[in-house]
Amino acid sequence: MEHKNLPNCPVVTTLQLISNKWKILILRDLMIGTKRFHELKSSIQGISQKVLTANLRSMEEDGLVHREVYPVVPPKVEYSLTLLGQSLEPIIQAMYIWGEKYKKNIQY
Amino acid sequence: MEHKNLPNCPVVTTLQLISNKWKILILRDLMIGTKRFHELKSSIQGISQKVLTANLRSMEEDGLVHREVYPVVPPKVEYSLTLLGQSLEPIIQAMYIWGEKYKKNIQY
DNA sequence: CTGTATCCTAGAAGATACTG
DNA sequence: CAGTATCTTCTAGGATACAG
């Protein structure tokens, strides 16, 4: 993501970095710990390889994700959160808590 | 939004309702209090009338927003959050706090 | 003022094939 | 394994006009 001028509203600032459901899900997964490319692809239901790659690159640019390449054959690449990425935890946490309550309260 | 089967992950559940930046911004605005259509349009930078309407309708269907129509001329319509909508406050709050910290720490 | 109704387009995402 | 490259499809969103 290119560097945009920071908007007045902090919520908008946050949205510039994570206004995308795939990024939220990537964050959710990496909160737990380091993961390889295919682990991410497996645990994120419905994401394509191309889209996963694009989002990981974007999050790398934004300083949320760290990409570690091991020079082995076959290739091994591990993704993890930077400190900045980890600092988003309260947001994911709030979404997790809300989703749980919502499920409990819904009438079938 | 049509009613989908609830996914396992609570984060995904939450995303089904607010995986859209416009909805987040609408929530942010209505957290403060009731607003009329044009007030929302003014305070949400860059949203078109059509998109605002569509998102408000969707959020109404999802039970997040209440729409109150006053039978006067010219028309007066007020939007407010339902209890369910209000319950999303911790998420918006977390995004607000994060955005503020991010702005403070960024190096120019 | 608060909307609908159309038409249109840019960009996101899917499908598939190929590679170091 | 972890991608890139292409091509196609799809949909969110913009522009504009009009209505109760």
Image (cartoon, coloured by chain):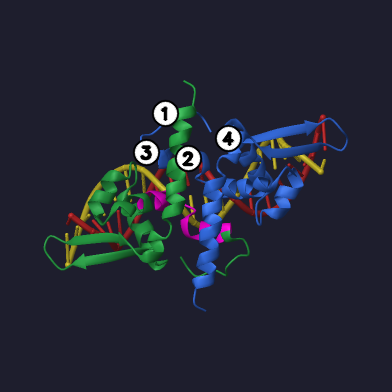
Chain colours: A green, B blue, C yellow, D red
The answer to whether residue B58 of the structure is visible from this angle is no
Residue D5, percent from left and from top: 31, 61
Magenta region, mostly helix, strand or loop?
Answer: helix
Residue A71, percent from left and from top: 15, 68
Is-magenta flag for residue B2? no
The answer to whether dots 1 and 2 both sit on one chain is no
Asked if residue B69 is positioned above or below residue A42 in the image, the reply reads above
- Kindly identify which residue carries mark 2: A98
Amino acid marked by disc 3: Cys
Are the residues at dot 2 and dot 3 in contact (C-beta closer than 8 Å)?
no
**Marked residue chain, label 2:** A
- Kindly identify which residue carries mark 1: B5
Gap in Å between the C-alphas at discs 1 and 3? 12 Å
- Per the rendered image, the range of residues in magenta is A11-26
In the rendering, which numbered label is found on residue B9? 3
Amino acid marked by disc 2: Trp
Residue C10, percent from left and from top: 53, 57
Asked if residue C5 is positioned above or below residue A48 in the image, the reply reads above
Gap in Å between the C-alphas at discs 3 and 4? 19 Å
In the rendering, which numbered label is found on residue B84? 4
